Image (spheres, grey):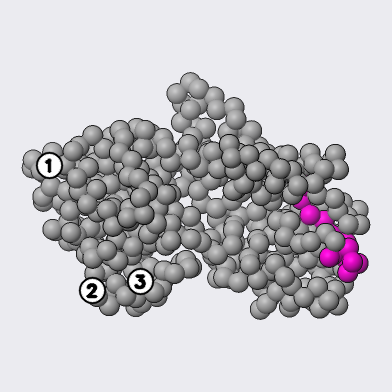
């Protein structure tokens, strides 16, 4: 089998590499020449645990190739995956120019039957637009070539993308073609040996499934954050409450950790896009509107605690931040809560010294020299007025508090992810502000 994957971001590169691992010939195509050059030189442009090994193995075997030229790589291709970005437009809807651009290009170059699969997260109805865009180009060429479209939303998580792809909970495929079903079943069979299902459905339901999944997850986060804030006011402990409710199997204990709000390239834009789709269709998604509002508010809670502690006097102070990526094990800083916290501290006239184990390049690209990047977590704390824990990288979980106490100007920690032990910090005479729990002041 031969496939092409268009777009070599987190989704396209991981999918292409994992498909190659099953013996399929894969060409990954991207318009970003620099990215393709890097990949052709054996360099991976993103950080994703476990990717390098399998990338190298498949490149060496000649099964995984990279190119900027889609047209010439469509020859002999059975399946083309569209995995390009779908960033939010100004009005919050998903911008489909990249997806439809690729569809047009496929229509201009295809010369035999193939299945065109939309893997990007796209609003309901997009696969029809993809089909029409391809058909329009074929008609312009005056040729009659058969093809099928399918929707195959991706559920991998950055930070564990390779494992998620190799061992998926489920594969969702939307298509109305039996031929396409057979091709997709064959392609995905090696990933489903663990008994997890491949769910075939109509295209609209498949497109909707992805948005409903991300919206549900975002809802859990905003729910627990809102409850955490109330816990703080009432004197309850969100950690106890979280365990108390999570023990009910109808609720479950996963994805119930309070923090500084969700970020990343998916939840914020997908929640926005679904709200927009609903509004356009005369239905207001009240719950998701609240989810978004709660999240916006949550991104400021750590800063508000800092401001309150220092009676609003932040000018000239220096703060250490641990973790800039939107979550651990990724270098992705898109819509990261850290960005809001950094901007607010800078606006208030403070200096920020930050450390993140892998998002250094990304931080430099986004924030330039607005902040100082420390070489390790301890250097970030030298003479800082306080430490703000924003991303819970594993290596931040058991720091040497004695050393920290000496490096920091004040023994003061604002913990946006509740990773430290109240009793331990109390004993060490730290002032400690967690989220949704009693602070030690
Ligand atoms: P990304 O921004 O990391 O990568 C997108 C890539 O597409 C870029 O390399 C870009 O250069 C390339 N591209 C754009 N136009 C192109 C064109 N015409 N031809 C070839 N390449 C082109 O994006 P991502 O995070 O991989 O996400 C891709 C899609 O998958 C989005 O719709 C996203 O919502 C969805 N998704 C992402 C995740 C995730 O965790 N990142 C998970 C599930 C689904």
Report crowding for label 3: few under 14, some 14 to 19, many 20 or more residues within 10 A (C-alpha): many
Q: Whole-Å distance between the Cαs marked 2 and 1?
A: 29 Å
Q: Quadrant of residue 202?
A: top left
* Mark 1 or mark 3, earlier in chain: 3
| Observer-nearest of 219 and 45 | 219
Q: Secondary structure at mark 3?
A: helix
Q: Secondary structure at mark 1?
A: loop
Which tag, 3 or 2, sits closer to the chain's start? 3
* Quarter of the rendering occupied by the N terminus: bottom left
Q: Is residue 342 visible?
A: no
* Image vertical order of residue 399 relative to residue 142, above or below: below
Q: Residue at x 39, y 41 (%)?
A: 122
Magenta highlight range: 424-436
Task: Sort mark 1 into few (<14), some (14-19) or many (20+) by Cα contacts within 10 Å.
Answer: few
Q: Are marks 1 and 3 in contact (CB under 8 Å)?
A: no
Q: CA distance from mark 3 to mark 2?
A: 11 Å
Residues at badges 2 and 1 in contact (C-beta under 8 Å)? no
Say which of 424 and 214 sits in front. Answer: 424
Determine which residue is flagged by label 2.
62
Q: Nearer the viewer, residue 247 or 21?
A: 247
Q: Is mark 3 within 8 Å of ligand 1?
A: no
Residue sitting farthest toward the left: 143
Tell me, for residue 281, which label it has, or none.
none
Residue visible at 79% across and 39% down? 230
x, y (%) of residue 21? 30, 66
Q: Left or right? Give the position of 395 relative to 228.
A: left
Numbered circle sitting on residue 55: 3
Residue 367 is covered by the magenta coloring: no
Residue that numbered label 1 is attached to: 146
Mark 2 neighbour class, 10 Å CA radius: few under 14, some 14 to 19, many 20 or more: few
Q: Residue at x 19, y 45 (%)?
A: 182
């Amino acid at each position: 089998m031969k496939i092409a994957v268009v777009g070599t971001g987190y989704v396209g590169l991981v999918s292409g590499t994992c498909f190659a691992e099953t013996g399929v010939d894969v060409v990954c195509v991207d318009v970003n020449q620099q990215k393709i050059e890097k990949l052709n030189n054996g360099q991976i442009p993103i950080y994703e645990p476990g990717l390098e090994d399998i990338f190298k193995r498949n490149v060496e075997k000649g099964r995984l190739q990279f190119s900027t030229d889609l047209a010439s790589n469509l020859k002999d291709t059975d399946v083309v995956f569209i995995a390009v970005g779908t960033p939010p437009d100004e009005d919050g809807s998903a911008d489909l120019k990249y997806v439809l651009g690729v569809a047009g290009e496929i229509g201009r170059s295809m010369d035999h039957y193939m299945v065109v699969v939309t893997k990007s997260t796209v609003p309901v109805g997009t696969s029809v637009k993809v089909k029409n865009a391809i058909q329009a180009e074929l008609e312009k060429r005056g040729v009659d070539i058969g093809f099928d479209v399918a929707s195959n939303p991706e559920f991998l998580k950055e930070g564990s993308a390779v494992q998620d792809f190799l061992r998926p909970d489920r594969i969702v495929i939307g298509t109305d073609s039996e031929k396409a079903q057979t091709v997709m079943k064959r392609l995905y069979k090696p990933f489903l040996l663990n008994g997890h299902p491949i769910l075939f459905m109509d295209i609209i339901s498949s497109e909707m499934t992805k948005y409903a999944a991300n919206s549900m997850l975002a809802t859990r986060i905003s729910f627990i954050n809102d409850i955490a804030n109330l816990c703080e006011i009432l004197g309850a402990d969100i950690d106890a409450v979280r365990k108390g409710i999570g023990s009910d199997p109808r609720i479950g204990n996963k994805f119930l950790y309070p923090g500084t709000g969700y970020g990343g390239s998916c939840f914020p834009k997908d929640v926005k896009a679904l709200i927009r789709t609903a509004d356009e269709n005369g239905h207001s998604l009240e719950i998701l509107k609240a989810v978004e509002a709660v999240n916006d508010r949550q991104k400021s809670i750590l800063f508000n605690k800092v401001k309150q502690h220092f009676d609003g006097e932040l000018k000239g102070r220096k703060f250490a931040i641990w973790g800039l990526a939107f979550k651990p094990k990724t270098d992705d800083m898109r819509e990261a809560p850290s960005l809001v916290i950094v901007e607010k501290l800078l606006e208030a006239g403070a200096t920020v010294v930050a450390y993140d184990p892998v998002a250094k390049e990304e931080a430099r690209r986004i924030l330039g020299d607005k902040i100082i990047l420390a070489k390790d977590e301890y250097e970030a704390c030298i003479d800082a007025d306080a430490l703000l824990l924003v991303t819970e990288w594993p290596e931040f979980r058991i720091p040497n508090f004695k050393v920290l106490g000496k490096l920091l100007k004040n023994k003061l920690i604002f913990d946006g992810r509740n990773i430290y032990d109240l009793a331990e910090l109390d004993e060490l005479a730290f002032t400690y502000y967690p989220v949704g729990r009693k602070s030690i002041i």
